[in-house]
Amino acid sequence: MVSKAASSLVPVEKNTLLYSVLIPAYNEEKNIIPTLESLAAALRAESIPFELLVVNDNSTDNTVAVIEEKAKEIPEIHLVHNWPPGGLGRAIRCGLHHYRGDVLAVVMADSSDNPLDVVRCYRKIEEGYDCVFGSRFVKGGRVTHYPPVKLVVNRIVNHAMQVLFLTHHNDLTNAFKVYRRHVIQSILPLQAAHFNITIEMSLSSLIRRYRIAQVPITW
């Protein structure tokens, strides 16, 4: 299955879409502040209206305290809590009931996703796409410090899904993807509780034949 042709895209006026960046966070007191600061700086530099929606996934360290303190400096921070049981999928599902934007990106709290890629994906949405899938494995993409065994498993799983769903998208397991609000609304309710949420969201968008762009990203 392939995405709809780009010729049907309808561009929107730049910077008219509120951008929600959903960040699930479990015990990220040492990582979350650099992530929030770099995202805010990159989005402000491009004059993109945004919110940083942090979902506290039952953290037992000082994650909540450091976020609340940083929110005094970055008012775009919006903190919500995922009540037990935890899990990445449940945290993302929680965030999908609280985001305010027209466009939503899922970004990890540990700075593994590049803020410049977050900006680039917003620009692709402005071109008229419904979704933007970041790929670490197309020309221009880059992966560093990825465990070799995990990398092999990743490529096997993604290749199998490419064959099964007849798609050119080759990084469906990657959490970093961007969706318009109407796409999110159409794929709810989601069921995944853990990392399989990334596949559920990707495939749910693909089978509905939304207009999806694939862009190279660094990880």
Image: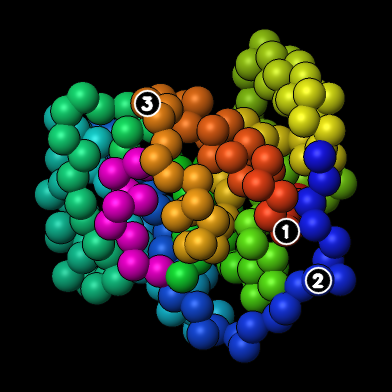
Does the image show residue 105?
Answer: no
- Residue where numbered disc 3 is placed: 193
Residue nearest the viewer, comparing 122 with 167:
167
Does the image show residue 8?
Answer: yes
Viewed as shown, does residue 62 lie left or right of 130? left
Residue nearest the viewer, comparing 74 with 200:
200
Q: CA distance from mark 3 to mark 2?
A: 35 Å
Amino acid residing under circle 3: Ala
Q: Is residue 75 above or below residue 193?
A: below
- Residue where numbered disc 2 is placed: 8
For the image shown, how many numbered marks are present on the structure? 3
Q: Is residue 48 above or below residue 217?
A: below
Label 1 packing within 10 angstroms: few (<14), some (14-19), many (20+)? many
In the rendered structure, which disc, 3 or 2, sits on the residue that comes first in sequence? 2
Amino acid residing under circle 2: Ser
Amino acid residing under circle 1: Arg
Viewed as shown, does residue 19 lie left or right of 2? left
Q: CA distance from mark 2 to mark 1?
A: 9 Å
Residue nearest the viewer, comparing 197 with 58:
197
Q: CA distance from mark 3 to mark 1?
A: 26 Å
Foreground label between 3 and 1: 1
- Labelled pair 2, 1 in contact (Cβ < 8 Å): yes
Which region of the structure is painted magenta? 92-101
Residue 202: x %, y % from top left: 61, 40
Locate the C terminus by quadrant: top right
Q: Which mark is residue 211?
A: 1
What SS does tag 2 mark? helix
Residue 69: x %, y % from top left: 15, 60
What SS does tag 1 mark? loop
Asked if residue 147 lies in the magenta stretch, the reply is no
Res. 78 image quadrant: bottom left
